[in-house]
Image (spheres, rainbow, N blue to C red):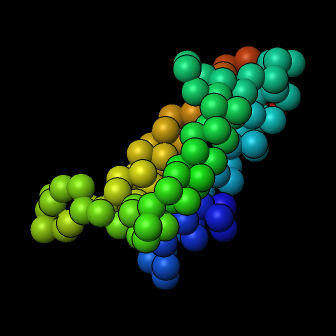
Amino acid sequence: MTIVCAVLKVGSEPWKIFAMAPPVMATHYSIEYNSHFTNCHITAIGLIGATEQLLIQQGFIAATAFFAETNDAYQVIMFEAMGHNFSLSEVLIIASSLAGINFEVTQYWGGFSAAKDKLYAL
């Protein structure tokens, strides 16, 4: 997570740091929760799995080597909304966070649904 935050130049903006937690930090826990109740270790939901996510992250990190300004390339303004100029870095953080939340909710729901003892699952 430190590398991702550094490449995207998160700085001292807490919302960006917290938004990176679902896709980067909490994914493993949701996979283990689901596999505990289903006896099936699922690392992919839909088209994107843990390996694909890693390759995408590493691709964005490696891409900075091809820009003259390295990770400043992610500070390009993509669009303006609600009086805020959203940079490519912020768009990537928001998209990653939403994808991570979707992945984890699906994993948690699958595990909870398969649990025989719902109280234990909570």
> Which residue: 72% across, 27% down?
43
Q: Is residue 21 above or below residue 16?
A: above
Residue 47 screen position, x and y as percent: 55, 20
Horizontal side, residue 64 vs residue 43: left or right: left
Horizontal side, residue 117 vs residue 105: left or right: right
Q: How many marks?
A: 0
> Which residue: 82% across, 18% down?
40
> Which residue: 85% across, 28% down?
36
Q: Is residue 12 above or below residue 85?
A: below
Pick out the residue farthest to the bottom. 12
Looking at the rendering, which quadrant does residue 83 occupy? bottom left
> Which residue: 69% across, 34% down?
50
- Does residue 57 show up? no
- For the C terminus, the image quarter is top right
- For the N terminus, the image quarter is bottom right
- Does residue 11 show up? yes
**106 or 98: nearer the viewer:** 98
Horizontal side, residue 45 vs residue 76: left or right: right
Residue 66 screen position, x and y as percent: 50, 56
**1 or 31: nearer the viewer:** 1
Residue 94 screen position, x and y as percent: 40, 52
Residue 60 screen position, x and y as percent: 53, 50
